[in-house]
Amino acid sequence: MLKEFKEFAVKGNVVDMAVGIIVGGAFTTVVKSVVDDLVMPPVSLLTGGLDFTNKFVVLREGSGLPPPYSTLAQAEAAGATVLAYGTFVNAVVAFIIVAMALFIVIRWINRLRRPDTADAPSTKSCSFCKEPIHLQATRCPRCTSELDVSAAA
């Protein structure tokens, strides 16, 4: 049983997945910084100074400080039940950025994998009916014409 587990754990797919999860965790930190520090300030500026992190709705007042609460942290410290939709907006923006960055990285990797040369053709046109036929065919299956054997070689 230990040997089977070792074979499973050392397989390429499991190791690749583990590396992907670790890199994904580090990538999430970078994306969170990009969203919080680079994307949201211009969005806030364009919306007239709107700061999404402190956008919330109080569902139930807390037992500590009386409302109104000026920040989300103040409302949470007072024990209020809040609907923090600003945090959700930030999470959606972060998700979109992560998805776009992942799309770009995968697209780049796929371009590296693709060969630059086109595949050799496997068909040719029948000289009589112009239908596609296999390169080594000596007779067209469509019009049954005999083809030039020297062209097939």
Image (spheres, rainbow, N blue to C red):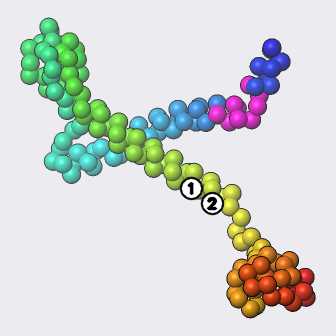
Q: Nearer the viewer, residue 27 or 82?
A: 82
From this viewpoint, which residue is outermost toward the top? 63
Q: Secondary structure at mark 1?
A: helix
Crowding near pointer 2: few (<14 within 10 Å), some, many (20+)? Answer: few
Q: Is residue 56 above or below residue 116?
A: above
Crowding near pointer 1: few (<14 within 10 Å), some, many (20+)? Answer: few
Residue at 35 percent across and 46 percent down: it is 38
On the image, the x and y values in percent for residue 133 come to 76, 78
Left of 121 or right of it: where is 24? left
The image quarter in which residue 19 lies: top right
Residue 74 appears in the rendering: no
Type of the residue with mark 1: Arg
In this rendering, the count of numbered labels is 2
On the image, the x and y values in percent for residue 127 come to 76, 90
Q: Nearer the viewer, residue 127 or 142?
A: 142
Residue 135 appears in the rendering: yes
Left of 81 or right of it: where is 100? right
On the image, the x and y values in percent for residue 50 come to 18, 42
Type of the residue with mark 2: Arg
In the picture of the structure, the residue carrying the numbered disc 1 is: 107
Q: Is residue 14 magenta?
A: yes
Left of 62 or right of it: where is 102? right
In the picture of the structure, the residue carrying the numbered disc 2 is: 111
Q: Secondary structure at mark 2?
A: helix
Q: Nearer the viewer, residue 137 or 72?
A: 137
Q: Is residue 124 above or below residue 92?
A: below
Q: Is residue 21 magenta?
A: no
The residues colored magenta run 9-17
Residue at 77 percent across and 73 percent down: it is 122
Q: Is residue 98 above or below residue 110?
A: above
Residue at 68 percent across and 36 percent down: it is 16
Labels 2 and 1 touching (C-beta < 8 A): yes
